[in-house]
Image (cartoon, helix red, strand yellow):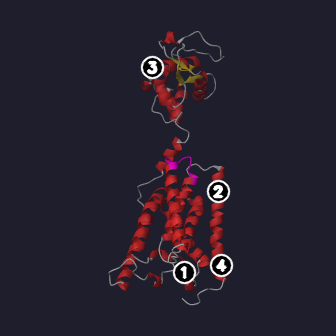
């Protein structure tokens, strides 16, 4: 309706009188002055397009029932009687196209008070606005997130237990010595299969724990609020498994502790969410830029520490594997508000890659000779 209100050009400023054109296309003799309007005209083609949306049976008139159906379809609180009162000038309980044009011209003076304008405005909400609202509605505060807090609490409790054992209840940044834990992943203990996942519960020091817990909450809680506990728990555990499997293949002499791979998997899930719901996601560009900047900075820091500082205490390949698992598996199991055919193909490709990489790493661990013979 009004350009500033509707984001369409249905009513345009003009110096000439308004022309009303009947269905046949010939301009009618009625001018804006005859209806008390002096500064606006109606774009007939756009008005006809909207008229046809209301005229469900395409018989050239909008009936009471068709107004009721339109108000229900576009979730408008405007009543059919109000719409007829605005547009039915001959009181026959139906609106012809010339009457529709005349009603629009009259409504142009007071668009905020017009039920017809409000209903048409509902039609011309930006294309993806409804999907954006659906995406925002997917965030649930109840039931509250449970998986991330439970894993976080378990990791803190285990850290306290090992601190009391190894550090006389006074942990430092490099204590407890959790690499000796039966939960830690050690290359020589690959027959103890539980270590491929339980290593995420133990940490090498207070600094390691605090950093992982902070990032875990920041990236994990939003994921669980929209995806729920089952999907969130699945990707979290698969991120941990991916980290230990990748480390055993590409960094076979490294012991592994900490939830970093699972946390990076959650970060990868954010990437998958953006890809799957780009059209529906509010503030998608800002979110993508921030996430991309964080990933690039972390990647640059990891490369610097590994190859320039020669820091081999961190399993960067485990971090990368967790991130890749989040990106690939996430496309298959995370929520897609409005899936498209390309996105469905991407989901199957992501699932296939995740499964293939996991199976390949398992076969490697089962068949390749161990680099470290003893646990």
> Which residue bears the numbered disc 1?
254
Does the residue at mark 3 contact the one at mark 4 (Cβ under 8 Å)? Answer: no
**Residue at disc 1, secondary structure:** loop
The relative height of residue 56 versus residue 181 in the rendered view (above or below) is: above
Q: Residue at x 62, y 16 (%)?
A: 22
Q: Kindly report the distance in space between the C-alpha atoms of the residues bearing marks 3 and 1.
A: 75 Å
Tell me the element at label 3.
loop
- Where residue 243 appears, as percent x and y from the top left, is 55, 72
Residues at marks 4 and 1 touching, judged by CB atoms closer than 8 Å:
no
- Magenta range: 275-285
Q: Are marks 4 and 2 in contact (CB under 8 Å)?
A: no
Asked if residue 180 can be seen in this view, the reply is yes
The residues tagged by marks 1 and 2 sit, at their Cα atoms, a distance apart of 34 Å
Total of numbered circles in the picture?
4
Estimate the spatial distance between the alpha carbons at disc 3 and disc 4, rounded to whole Å.
75 Å
Q: Position of residue 285 (x, y in %)?
A: 52, 49
Q: Earlier in the sequence, mark 3 or mark 1?
A: 3
Name the residue at 53% across, 66% down: 234
Say few, some or many: other residues with alpha carbon within 10 Å of mark 3 (under 14 / 14 to 19 / 20 or more): some
**Residue hosting label 4:** 364
Image coordinates for residue 269, horizontal then vertical, percent: 53, 60
Q: Is residue 11 above or below residue 311?
A: above
Q: Can the viewer see residue 230?
A: no
Which dot marks residue 346?
Answer: 2
Quadrant of image for the C terminus: bottom right
Can residue 212 be found in the magenta stretch? no
Along the polypeptide, which appears first: circle 2 or circle 3? 3
Q: Mark 4 or mark 2, which has the lower sequence index?
A: 2
Report crowding for label 1: few under 14, some 14 to 19, many 20 or more residues within 10 A (C-alpha): some
Query: Residue 167's x, y, as percent?
Result: 35, 83
């Amino acid at each position: 309706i009004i350009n500033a209100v509707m984001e369409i050009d249905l009513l345009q400023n003009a110096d000439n009188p308004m022309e009303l054109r009947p269905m046949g296309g010939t301009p009618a003799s009625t001018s804006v002055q005859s209806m008390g309007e002096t500064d606006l005209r109606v774009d007939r083609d756009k008005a006809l397009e909207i008229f046809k949306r209301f005229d469900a049976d395409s018989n050239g008139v909008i009936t009471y029932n068709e107004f009721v159906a339109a108000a229900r379809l576009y979730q408008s609180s405007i009543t059919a009687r109000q719409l007829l009162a605005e547009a039915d000038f001959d009181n026959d309980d139906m609106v012809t196209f010339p009457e529709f044009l005349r009603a629009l011209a009259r409504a142009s003076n007071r668009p905020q008070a017009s039920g017809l304008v409000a209903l048409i405005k509902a039609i011309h909400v930006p294309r993806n606005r409804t999907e954006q609202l659906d995406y925002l509605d997917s965030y649930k505060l109840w039931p509250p997130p449970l998986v991330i807090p439970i894993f976080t609490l378990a990791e803190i409790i285990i850290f306290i237990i090992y601190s009391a054992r190894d550090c006389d209840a006074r942990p430092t940044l490099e204590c407890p010595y959790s690499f000796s834990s039966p939960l830690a992943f050690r290359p020589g203990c690959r027959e103890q299969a539980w270590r491929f996942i339980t290593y995420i519960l133990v940490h090498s020091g207070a600094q390691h724990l605090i950093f992982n817990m902070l990032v875990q909450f920041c990236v994990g809680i939003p994921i669980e609020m929209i995806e729920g506990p089952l999907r969130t728990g699945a990707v979290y555990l698969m991120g941990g498994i991916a980290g230990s499997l990748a480390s055993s293949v590409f960094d076979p002499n490294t012991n592994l502790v900490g939830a970093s791979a699972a946390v990076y998997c959650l970060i990868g899930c954010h990437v998958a969410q953006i890809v799957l719901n780009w059209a529906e996601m509010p503030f998608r560009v800002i979110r993508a830029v921030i996430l991309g900047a964080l990933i690039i900075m972390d990647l640059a820091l990891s490369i610097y520490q590994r190859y320039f500082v020669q820091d081999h205490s961190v399993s960067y390949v485990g971090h990368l594997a967790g991130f890749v698992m989040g990106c690939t598996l996430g496309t298959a199991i995370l929520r897609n508000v409005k899936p498209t055919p390309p996105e469905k193909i991407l989901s199957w490709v992501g699932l296939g890659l995740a499964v293939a990489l996991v199976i390949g790493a398992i076969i490697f661990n089962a068949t390749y000779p161990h680099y470290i013979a003893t646990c």
